[in-house]
Image: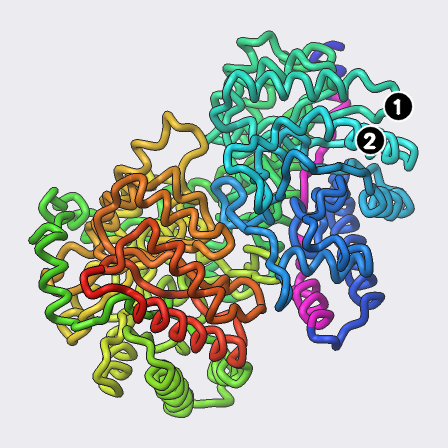
């Protein structure tokens, strides 16, 4: 096929689309089902209507091949576990009795049965449910949901492509099931899994699928020769099937590296590759392996993870080069649009100048279609679009909104001394223990307490003008007093004020910093029914005035126990925002760190003795390739130390991390030089405590003993058992007792019961310690 004929066949497509609906209809329906207010049939109809709406939006925009199978009630990896029959033994009875309830039990757990572990999807803020596998796992195919959703799209007259998590990535994301040896490698189950995928592919082909996409993002990470050989075997076997649709193997989030030649040689019909800045090397690597002669290439040239407009001329140059490297070149986003909000057009309060620079999912589909048109018909066919795009890019590059000379001068003046505490930890800890007077195994929480319906109503009434500021602040004070009174009665040692004034741990601060802007409808799924509105980091960052001092000081005045000041750290402020792409991330992190440093110093000056700077995103933002780790961790840990190093030795600095694989960054955790770190550990059975001990971590740590992402209430005995397991790795004088994460999403009844059990467990274990333990 010539380049000209290839261009004529250009298609526009996406790998996935936001699931929640314009007004988060899916969240409301699923949570309504959990509470018994929505029937299963009504939930299914809401889901079906959301799928139809998504497909129609895509088709109306000009997307010529829509994805199916990307929709999920909770998580697409959990959906894959159901598809291949990998239901944990403890959930099989419930799943057999009612597939929907069993599905949600795997995601959330029940009072009697623990859920699957949850962790971050590569380096995004999306969380997936980790498959649990073992030598005895028996896979069985259940393609009913995938087939049904394909048939729904075909019935609308659409060209549809089912999207599945690929078998290699599925196994590489899995962990040994409870009771299975820790060194068990799920990838050894590949030969057992491939026939199940073959059956699913045959079912989809019979239902009318011409193409099926198999997502293999795990192959963009560093992979061993054995893992690459497994990928080669998987696609050799699947490619050799006679009863199958055409296979499109997709990767995203980074360059494929060594795996590119493996997939290019495989007997599959096409590859989908990321060609955005972070994966730009894919272009050279594709040329080096001789391209994809006679095969389809889906080129991800529109960034599916950020919200800035595409540079059409840059993307067209890449696409033009690719025409000579594949039999057919189609245009797509770099990954599923699940990671961006739905529609920038719904925003009414954003500065019109900045609005020109933004592209959410619906705008990105327009960009994809425009680029496909330009590739197929030439740039003369999109002259107006190119001119408008140039003007918008120039508007951003030249805008005074993006640069503050004072901020840049302060950042340039940072010295090494600014990132170091005045005394080493061994000396600080003595001063802190004398100052705070805490018992062994001190108890605390991570920061937030339940945000009640009354509190949310008060916040909405304030925005709508139905409640004045004074009335709202009285409601916040009432909430703080209630939270403090409960903690004191329960016997918690280091208190928090509960954060009733905060809407979100990043957005709350972003709204008070220059350089950030907030959206009204920019919801993005984090996990299950948890959606966040990441703020947009558009310009240089500074703090006009204190952000948390008033409420922390108010709380401290109500009690003689220490109240933690609570801040979100600089890396998390970047990771959970849509960060600017026009300067290095390290430069932006230092700006945020200096703004937060001012806040930390003001908290200390106001009498706050314990200050927690949360960095749950430190691991999630770790680059996917090991060669890129050192540079990232250097600026990431530097920015944390820059935030906290201006305080006195007797001020105790805490940090918090959750739902990530911490073993990869234990040295970085050490390099933060925090006095205390609290970490998610309940679902992973205290794995992180062992990892810290293996590293020789010298500071204090609180591996969580309550999984707060499940509605179940752990008993005091269960919490005590986890605490004793923690003591096997961390000595009592350095072990804290706390939940896995903040309590914002939990209800008051379960929060009270769980924290009371947590305190009971701490007292029980503490009483059994010898005096010199």
Name the residue beneath numbered marker 1. Answer: 243
Colour scheme in the image?
Answer: rainbow
- Quarter of the image with the C terminus is bottom left
Q: Which residues are magenta?
A: 8-34
Q: Position of residue 165 (x, y in %)?
A: 68, 37
- Quarter of the image with the N terminus is top right
Q: Is residue 377 visible?
A: no
Task: Bin the neighbour count of mark 1 within 10 Å (Cα to Cα): few under 14, some 14-19, many 20 and up.
Answer: some
- Locate residue 85 relative to residue 345 in the image: left or right: right
Residue drawn at 20 percent across, 65 percent down: 771
Task: Bin the neighbour count of mark 2 within 10 Å (Cα to Cα): few under 14, some 14-19, many 20 and up.
Answer: many
Q: Is residue 319 visible?
A: yes
Residue drawn at 53 percent across, 62 percent down: 709
User: Is tag 1's residue or tag 2's residue first in the polypeptide sequence?
Assistant: 2
Q: How many marks?
A: 2
275, 419: nearer the viewer: 419
Position of residue 374 relative to residue 750, above or below, is above
Residue drawn at 63 percent across, 65 percent down: 112
Q: Position of residue 292 (x, y in %)?
A: 66, 13
Q: Position of residue 184 (x, y in %)?
A: 56, 33
Q: Mark 2 and mark 1 in contact (Cβ < 8 Å)? A: yes
Dot 2 falls on a residue whose secondary structure is helix
> Mark number for residue 100?
none
How far is disc 1 from disc 2 in space, using C-alphas? 8 Å
Dot 1 falls on a residue whose secondary structure is loop
Q: Is 32 one of the magenta-colored residues?
A: yes
598, 319: nearer the viewer: 598
Name the residue beneath numbered marker 2. Answer: 201
Q: Position of residue 398 (x, y in %)?
A: 35, 44
Q: Is 718 one of the magenta-colored residues?
A: no
334, 97: nearer the viewer: 97
Residue drawn at 53 percent across, 83 percent down: 457
């Amino acid at each position: 096929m010539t380049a000209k004929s290839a261009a004529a066949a250009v298609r526009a497509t996406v790998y996935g689309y936001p699931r929640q609906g314009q007004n988060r209809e899916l969240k409301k329906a699923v949570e309504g089902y959990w509470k018994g207010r929505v029937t299963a049939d009504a939930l299914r109809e809401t889901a079906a209507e959301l799928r139809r709406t998504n497909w129609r939006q895509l088709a109306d925009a000009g997307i010529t091949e829509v994805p199916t199978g990307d929709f999920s009630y909770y998580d697409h990896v959990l959906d894959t576990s159901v598809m291949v029959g990998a239901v944990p033994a403890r959930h099989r009875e419930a799943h057999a009795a009612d597939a929907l309830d069993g599905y949600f039990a795997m995601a959330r757990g029940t009072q009697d049965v623990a859920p699957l572990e949850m962790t971050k999807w590569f380096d995004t803020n999306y969380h997936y449910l980790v498959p649990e596998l073992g030598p005895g796992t028996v896979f069985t195919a259940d393609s009913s949901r995938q087939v049904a959703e394909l048939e729904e799209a075909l019935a609308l007259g659409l060209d549809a492509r089912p999207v599945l998590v690929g078998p290699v990535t599925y196994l590489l994301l899995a962990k040994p099931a409870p009771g299975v040896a820790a060194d068990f490698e799920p990838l050894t189950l590949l030969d057992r899994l491939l026939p199940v995928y073959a059956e699913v592919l045959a079912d989809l082909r019979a239902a009318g699928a011409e193409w099926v996409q198999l997502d293999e993002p795990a192959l963009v990470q560093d992979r061993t020769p054995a893992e690459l050989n497994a990928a080669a075997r998987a696609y050799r076997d699947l490619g050799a099937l006679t009863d199958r649709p055409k296979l499109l193997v997709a990767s995203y989030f980074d360059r494929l590296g060594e795996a590119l030649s493996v997939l290019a040689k495989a007997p599959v019909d096409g590859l989908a590759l990321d060609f955005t800045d972070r994966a730009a090397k894919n272009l050279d690597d594709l040329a080096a392996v001789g391209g994809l002669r006679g095969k389809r290439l889906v080129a991800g040239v529109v960034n599916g993870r950020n919200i800035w407009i595409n540079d059409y001329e840059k993307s067209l140059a890449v696409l033009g080069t690719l025409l000579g490297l594949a039999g057919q070149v189609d245009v797509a986003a770099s990954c599923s649009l699940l990671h961006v909000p739905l529609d920038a057009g719904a925003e009414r309060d954003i500065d019109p100048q900045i609005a020109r620079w933004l592209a959410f999912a619906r705008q990105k589909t327009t960009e994809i279609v425009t680029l496909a048109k330009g590739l197929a018909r030439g740039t003369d066919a999109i002259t107006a679009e190119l001119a408008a795009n140039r003007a918008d890019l120039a508007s951003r590059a030249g805008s005074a909104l993006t640069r503050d000379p004072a901020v840049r001068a302060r950042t340039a003046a940072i010295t090494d001394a600014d990132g170091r505490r005045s005394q080493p930890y061994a000396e600080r800890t003595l001063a802190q223990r004398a100052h705070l007077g805490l018992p062994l195994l001190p108890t605390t929480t991570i920061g937030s307490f339940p945000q009640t319906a009354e509190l949310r109503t008060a916040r909405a009434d304030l925005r709508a003008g139905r409640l004045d500021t004074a009335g709202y602040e009285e409601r916040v004070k009432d909430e703080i007093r209630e939270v403090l009174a409960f903690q004191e009665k329960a016997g918690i040692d280091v208190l928090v004020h509960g954060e009733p004034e905060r809407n979100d741990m990043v957005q709350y601060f972003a709204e008070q910093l220059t350089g950030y802007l907030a959206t009204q409808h920019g919801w993005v799924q984090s996990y299950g029914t948890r959606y966040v509105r990441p703020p947009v980091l558009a310009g240089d960052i500074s703090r006009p005035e204190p952000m948390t001092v008033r409420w922390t000081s108010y709380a401290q005045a109500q009690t003689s126990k220490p109240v933690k000041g609570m801040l979100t750290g600089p890396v998390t402020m970047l990771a959970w925002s849509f960060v600017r792409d026009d300067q290095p991330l390290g430069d932006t992190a230092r700006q945020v760190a200096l703004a937060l440093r001012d806040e930390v110093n003001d908290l200390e000056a106001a009498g706050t003795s314990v200050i927690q700077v949360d960095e749950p995103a430190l691991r999630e933002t770790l680059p996917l390739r090991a060669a890129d780790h050192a540079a990232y961790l250097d600026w990431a840990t530097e920015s944390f130390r820059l935030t906290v190093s201006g305080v006195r030795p007797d001020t105790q600095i805490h940090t918090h991390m959750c739902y990530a694989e911490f073993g990869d960054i234990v040295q970085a955790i050490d390099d933060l030089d925090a006095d205390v770190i609290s970490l998610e550990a309940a679902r992973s059975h205290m794995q992180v405590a062992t990892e810290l001990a293996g590293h020789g971590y010298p500071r204090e740590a609180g591996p969580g003993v309550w999984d707060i992402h499940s509605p179940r209430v752990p008993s005091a005995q269960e919490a005590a058992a986890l605490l004793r397991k923690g003591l096997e790795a961390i000595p009592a004088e350095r072990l804290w007792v706390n939940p896995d994460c903040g309590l914002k999403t939990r209800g008051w009844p379960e929060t009270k019961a769980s924290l009371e059990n947590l305190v009971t467990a701490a007292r029980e274990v503490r009483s059994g310690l010898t005096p010199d333990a």
